């Protein structure tokens, strides 16, 4: 019983804890990772189809460049969308005054680039660090995805798209 009381006090105690940051941050991490995985899966399917269709014209290097370039652009848009979700949360909880500054702060936190003159309200400072953790996860997923895609559509890929050796 004492453990449950301690846990509840930790979660709902006012300004002395960072429970609200975790209560907002953890679901945002889960939502953005799910969006990211689904988005990358969809982008990957379309990239492979696009590559297969374009390879009928026999320009492997040009096709490779277009597919990888388009995929990187779409992955960047996906990251921007997820950053926007964090920015909306910052404005909603009152950590930042407007969407423009929230988006700038969020992009800095997501990329762990940092920021010069933007700070969250003292009460929400941990939330920015939690977003940086989310950025590590999302960029790791993107890196693994791009590595896989480059191997799949590389002109030097000897196994082809279906994984079987040419005969």
Image (tube, grey):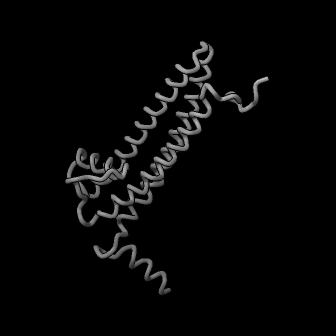
Q: Residue furthest top?
A: 57
How many labels were placed on the picture?
0
Which is more toward the observer, 64 or 42? 64
Q: Residue furthest front?
A: 156
Q: Quadrant of residue 6?
A: bottom left
Residue for point 46% across, 47% down: 139
Residue for point 49% across, 83% down: 3
- 112 versus 18 height, above or below: above
Q: Quadrant of residue 153?
A: top right
Quarter occupied by the C terminus: top right
Which is more toward the observer, 18 or 166? 166
Q: Position of residue 156 (x, y in %)?
A: 63, 27
Q: Position of residue 101 (x, y in %)?
A: 23, 48
Which is more toward the observer, 160 or 52? 160
Q: Position of residue 128 (x, y in %)?
A: 33, 58
Residue 83 left/right relative to 45: left
Residue 74 left/right relative to 127: right
Q: Residue furthest bottom?
A: 2
- 67 versus 25 height, above or below: above
Residue for point 38% across, 55% down: 131
- 110 versus 50 height, above or below: below
Residue 49 left/right relative to 123: right
Residue for point 62% across, 32% down: 152
Residue 156 left/right relative to 82: right
Q: Position of residue 85 (x, y in %)?
A: 36, 47
């Amino acid at each position: 019983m004492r453990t449950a009381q301690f846990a509840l006090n930790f979660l709902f105690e006012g300004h002395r804890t960072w429970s609200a940051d975790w209560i907002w941050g953890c679901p945002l991490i889960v939502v953005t990772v799910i969006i990211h995985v689904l988005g990358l899966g969809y982008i990957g399917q379309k990239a492979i189809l696009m590559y297969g269709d374009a390879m009928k014209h026999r320009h492997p290097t040009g096709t490779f460049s277009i597919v990888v370039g388009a995929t990187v652009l779409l992955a960047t848009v996906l990251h921007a969308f997820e950053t926007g979700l964090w920015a909306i949360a910052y404005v909603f909880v009152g950590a930042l005054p407007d969407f423009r500054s929230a988006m700038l702060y969020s992009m800095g936190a997501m990329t762990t680039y940092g920021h010069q003159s933007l700070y969250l309200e003292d009460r929400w400072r941990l939330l920015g660090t939690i977003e940086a953790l989310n950025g590590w996860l999302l960029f790791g997923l993107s890196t693994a995805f791009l590595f896989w895609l480059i191997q799949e559509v590389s002109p030097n890929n000897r196994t082809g798209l279906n994984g079987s050796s040419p005969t």
